[in-house]
Image (cartoon, rainbow, N blue to C red):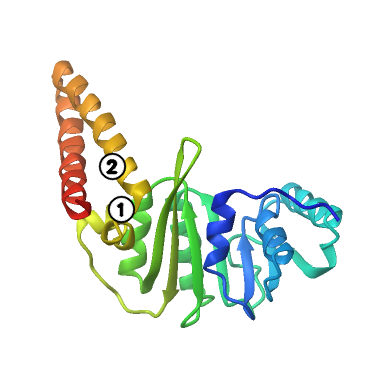
């Protein structure tokens, strides 16, 4: 059996997965999350799913080398469309926020998301748009954690579908309720870095002075304002 060295992001995602659950890893890619769960004695049934055959074959190879191939179900699936109805926990990570939104939207429309289904999401972009979608479409955020790994910041969102629509502030949509209220260190670093980058962009846009630049400057100024609101909350 081959043991893999796993990233902090995989370890953090696993924190939100309950024993006795049936986990569908959507977009499993190399299948590292299923391997982590099994090698760390999680009592779960696992479905490793991907829309393409090639990454699924890679996941099978990794599972075979680890001696765990017979403990994982592998399937080709476009989002949740091909997932066994017994699945109650869905992990969707490593995709853009809009891609995750599209997956969830189609699953809602087709009735594939039942009450109290759990989700662990980790978008690599467009986090604000995804949060707005979750709040407005019946996903209750249970916990959220920002972590830094090397030079990248990752957000892990654990939520449960209950069908109740909610509204939140721009700061929460942008950065997450728990990271703000818990004053998470990675968020503090992220806000400092974001303010510096946005301020530099704003200066360049002011110098450009074109109509296009001024329109973009308004957008950047709005983001800086929300950044400042978030900074006040964590300080």
Image side of residue 112 versus residue 20, left or right = left
For residue 154, above or below residue 140:
above
Q: Quadrant of the N terminus?
A: bottom right
Image quadrant of residue 221?
Answer: top left
Measured from the top left, where is residue 105 in percent x and y?
A: 44, 65
Image side of residue 150 versus residue 76, left or right = left
Q: How far apart are marks 1 and 2 (CA)?
A: 9 Å
Q: Name the residue under label 1.
A: 175
Query: Residue at position x 47%, y 65% from top?
Result: 104
Q: Residue 191 carries which label?
A: 2
Most extreme residue toward the top is: 207
SS at circle 2: helix
For residue 57, above or below residue 23:
above
Q: Which mark is residue 91?
A: none
Query: Residue at position x 63%, y 62% from top?
Result: 25
Q: 107 and 139: which one is in front?
A: 139
Measured from the top left, where is residue 150 in percent x and y?
A: 50, 37
Query: Residue at position x 20%, y 60% from top?
Result: 169
Query: Residue at position x 80%, y 57% from top?
Result: 63
Q: 32 and 92: which one is in front?
A: 32
Disc 1 vs disc 2: Cβ atoms closer than 8 Å? yes
């Amino acid at each position: 059996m081959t043991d893999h060295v796993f990233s902090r992001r995989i370890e953090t995602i696993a924190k939100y997965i309950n024993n006795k659950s049936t986990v569908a890893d959507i977009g499993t890619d190399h299948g590292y999350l299923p391997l982590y769960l099994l090698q760390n004695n999680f009592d779960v049934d696992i479905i490793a799913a991907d829309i393409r055959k090639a990454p699924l074959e890679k996941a099978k190879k990794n599972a075979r080398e680890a001696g765990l191939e017979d403990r994982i179900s592998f399937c080709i699936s476009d989002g949740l469309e091909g997932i066994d109805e017994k699945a109650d926990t869905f992990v969707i990570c490593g995709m853009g926020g809009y891609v995750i939104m599209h997956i969830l939207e189609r699953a809602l429309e087709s009735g594939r998301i039942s009450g109290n289904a759990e989700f662990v999401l980790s978008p690599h972009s467009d986090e604000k748009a995804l949060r707005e979608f979750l709040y407005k479409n019946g996903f209750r955020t249970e916990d959220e954690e920002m972590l830094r790994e090397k030079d990248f910041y990752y957000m892990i969102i654990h939520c449960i579908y209950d069908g109740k629509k909610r509204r939140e502030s721009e700061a929460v949509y942008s950065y997450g309720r728990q990271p703000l209220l818990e004053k998470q260190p990675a968020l503090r670093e992220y806000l400092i870095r974001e303010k510096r980058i946005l301020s530099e962009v704003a200066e360049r846009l002011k110098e450009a002075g074109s109509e296009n630049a001024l329109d973009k400057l308004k957008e950047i100024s709005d983001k800086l304002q929300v950044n400042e609101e978030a900074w006040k909350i964590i300080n």
